[in-house]
Amino acid sequence: MKPLLNVDSALKNILAAVRPLPSESISLAETLDRVIARDIVSPVDLPPFDNSAMDGYAIRHQDSAAANAANPVALSVVMDIPAGAAPTGVLETGQAARIMTGAPIPPGTSAVIPVEDTDDDWYKGEAAPVPATVRLFRALRADENIRRAGESIAAGHRIMAAGTALGPAEIGMLAGIGCAKVDVIRQPKVVILSSGDELVDVHQTPAPGQIRDSNSYSVAALVRAGGGVAIRLPIARDSLDSVRALYRRALEIHPDLIISTAGVSVGAADFVKTVLDELGDIDFWRINMRPGKPLAFGSLQGIPFFGLPGNPVSAMVTFEVLARPALARISGREFKRKTISAVTADALKSDGRRSYIRVTISRSDKGFIAHSTGIQSSGALMSMVLADGLAVVPEGTEFLPAGTELTVLLLRSLD
Ligand code: AMP
Ligand code: MG
């Protein structure tokens, strides 16, 4: 019997064996949740010019020093600068320019007085002509309501790091700096395989002794959530020919990663192991974790391969712990695990392996509390449906009294 392999060593071996995919150039509109292949340096200032933060009047702020509602100061209006227009001259002492939000301020401007603080009432909706004079009802400080060129981002600055997944704000910013095409890491194509005489697909009715294949659906969803493109192939039967045909078909797709579930445990029919040995270079590990002790990892004709355990919870937990970081690396994606620290609500038993206990999380004034979801069988997928996270019981622990502090890997955001 092989010795048990530590979870961290297994992950280290896995990450050393996978590489980020090459990049491709795609249109900005297609980039949501894609990963940028290189740092983004802004070629421009944003905003590109000094501009008004308000609809109002550009003035020299010194001119407003004596203004208040009882004694307004009158300035002559010499320019009108709607959005999209450029100033036509310099603003002198005693002058004002009507200006719209975002329009460039004329040279000489040191503040913009909002229209509400003047006697002009264009903001009430009338398309008013530009008045000859405007009265100011208050004094302004230097720079009030002026947005300076480059205050959001300055030309030459790195604004996003390679490995960032693009969200709505990043995409808007890339549009703002004129980035119409973006170099992103190619999305990994992941083939998902399942095999077993007891399995039928979701639309079929199981005969006595059969169950529906849930793993290929949960694993495909995990792959998509991790940024991959998931391709599920039909279930193979427990025969050498059927399993071999399935793996050949997987390889013909030229995927970037292959994930199978089942067939790697002691006592499982040997077909999967036989085919893996024929087609690739695969290690069969016994990992010091619960659930999910048996795991195969290696490469099939150069393509990274995971053989996850067949039990539905084991398949999902081993994906979370070992395959998700690998998928992130292949995707060029910076991998950050979301963890919290929580204390256990009840006493827990473990078996000395590193255990990932499905828990719900509640809050108290002392912090987070982890409650077991109840049945922790590796076949009980409902424990994953209920779980907010996986509480990690360190190896070598067999009993944890209530109130023990544990790290919890979050599976969803807490609300
Ligand atoms: P095996 O590794 O083939 O011995 O499978 C271990 C356990 O996982 C058995 O109870 C299988 O029925 C179950 N199992 C295997 N594959 C799947 C699947 N795709 N969906 C649901 N359960 C599965
Ligand atoms: Mg089986």
Image (cartoon, helix red, strand yellow):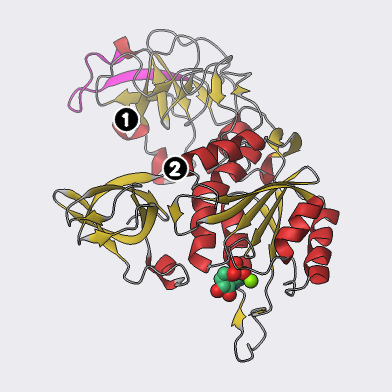
The residue shown at (44%, 52%) is 289
Expressed as whole percent of the image width and height from the top left, the position of residue 173 reads 56, 33
State how many labels appear: 2
Q: Quadrant of ligand 1?
A: bottom right
Q: Residues within 10 Å of mark 2 (few under 14, many from 20)?
A: few
Give coordinates of residue 108: x percent, y percent: 45, 9
Q: Secondary structure at mark 2?
A: loop
Which stretch appears magenta? 63-78
Q: Are marks 1 and 2 in contact (CB under 8 Å)?
A: no
Q: Can residue 51 be seen in the rendering of this structure? A: yes
Between the residue at mark 1 and the residue at mark 2, the CA separation in whole angstroms equals 54 Å
Relative side of 88 to 74, left or right: right
> Mark 2 — residue?
337
**Residue type marked 2:** Arg
Amino acid type at mark 1:
Thr
- Residue 232 shows in the view: no
**Residue 316, x across and y down, in percent:** 52, 60
Residue behind mark 1: 118
In the picture, measured across the screen, residue 107 lies left or right of residue 118, that is right
Question: How many neighbours does mark 1 have within 10 angstroms: few (below 14), some (14-19), or many (20 or more)?
Answer: some
Point out residue 320 in the picture as x, y percentages from the top left corner: 50, 52
**In which quadrant is the C terminus drawn?**
bottom left
